[in-house]
Structures are given as structure tokens and as C-alpha cells.
Image (cartoon, rainbow, N blue to C red):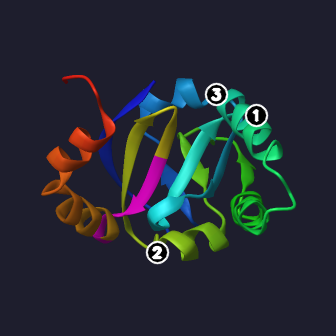
């Protein structure tokens, strides 16, 4: 399970250090793709395959299903870490998520998310005040 928040810098070649805590769970090969809220999602291969099966089951006759599948799969790339624990993020994913220098990598249960630091701070600040309301509307148990 992925959890935690880490700050790292992406270099001029698009390489980003993945926190050591996440490397083993990501495995030797993993997938990065466009995420929601203008971040990059990273999935271990077993999670990616499970998600792929769910998306394959969507009815291709539905316009929204086709659009989401195109968006999600066209941005995906298989990745491996180099010997220093870095991943090379494609230019299209860097552009999509606004990754240019300072990044935040967070663990979100079955995936990691890679955010530009400024977007993460804006998102966090905007969401923080509604956290309690969101939890009340989604959960029927106490934390």
C-alpha cells in the first residue's frame, strides 16, 4: 500500500527520484499515465492490469467511456527505475501535469500520484476546508 508525501526535484532530462518507500511496491516495471486533477498516476503492473480490465468492460458505445479510455491509455507508458531510483517521465506527461522543477509524490493506497508542487499546494489548500464534509458524504464509518 502506498502512503505518505515526499518532495523531490525533476531534472532537466525529466528524471524524478521515486521515494525508496515506494520502489519495491511499484516493482521492476510500472505504468505512469495522466491522472485526474492534472497530476500523473503511477500503478504497479498488477494494479494497472486490474484497472485495464475494468476499463475494457465499459461499453465502447458510450461516448464518455471512449473518451476516458482514450485519455487514460494514450498517456500511459511502461516505466522502469534506473540504478539511482529515478524514473524518466515523458514530455507529454510532464506538460500535462506541469512538472518542471519541484514535485510532490504522494501515496494513495493502490497508486502513487506525482504533482507539481504548486498544483499540489493549491489543490490541498482548496480541499482542506471541505475534508470533513467530503468524509461525511462518502463514509458510513468513523475514522
Q: Which residues are magenta?
A: 113-118
Report the Cα–Cα distance between label 3 and label 1. 14 Å
Q: Quadrant of residue 103?
A: bottom left
- Binning the other alpha carbons within 10 Å of mark 3 as few (below 14), some (14 to 19) or many (20 upward) gives some
Q: Residue at x 32, y 39 (%)?
A: 138
Look at mark 2 in the image and give the residue it sits on.
Answer: 98
Q: Is residue 91 visible?
A: yes
| x and y percentages locating residue 46 in the rendered image | 70, 27
Name the secondary structure under disc 3: loop
Q: Is residue 128 magenta?
A: no
Q: Is residue 12 visible?
A: no
Q: Residue at x 47, y 31 (%)?
A: 22
| x and y percentages locating residue 30 in the rendered image | 68, 39
Q: Residue furthest right?
A: 61
| x and y percentages locating residue 27 in the rendered image | 64, 27
- Determine which of the numbered discs, if any, sits on residue 27 in the image: 3
Quadrant including the C terminus: top left
Q: Residue at x 45, y 64 (%)?
A: 37
- Binning the other alpha carbons within 10 Å of mark 1 as few (below 14), some (14 to 19) or many (20 upward) gives few
Report the Cα–Cα distance between label 1 and label 2. 27 Å
- Determine which of the numbered discs, if any, sits on residue 49 in the image: 1
Question: Which tag, 3 or 2, sits closer to the chain's start?
Answer: 3
Amino acid at each position: 500500500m502506498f502512503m505518505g508525501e515526499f518532495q523531490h526535484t525533476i531534472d532537466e532530462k525529466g528524471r524524478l527520484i521515486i521515494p525508496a518507500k515506494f520502489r519495491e511496491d511499484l516493482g521492476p516495471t510500472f505504468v505512469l499515465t495522466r491522472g485526474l486533477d492534472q497530476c500523473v498516476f503511477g500503478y504497479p503492473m498488477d494494479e494497472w492490469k486490474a484497472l485495464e480490465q475494468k476499463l475494457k468492460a465499459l461499453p465502447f458505445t458510450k461516448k464518455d467511456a471512449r473518451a476516458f479510455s482514450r485519455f487514460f491509455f494514450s498517456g500511459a507508458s511502461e516505466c522502469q527505475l534506473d540504478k539511482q531510483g529515478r524514473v524518466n517521465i515523458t514530455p507529454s506527461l510532464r506538460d500535462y501535469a506541469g512538472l518542471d522543477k519541484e514535485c510532490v509524490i504522494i501515496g494513495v493506497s493502490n497508486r502513487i500520484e506525482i504533482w507539481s508542487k504548486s498544483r499540489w499546494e493549491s489543490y490541498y489548500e482548496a480541499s482542506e476546508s471541505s475534508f470533513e464534509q467530503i468524509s461525511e458524504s462518502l463514509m458510513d464509518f468513523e475514522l
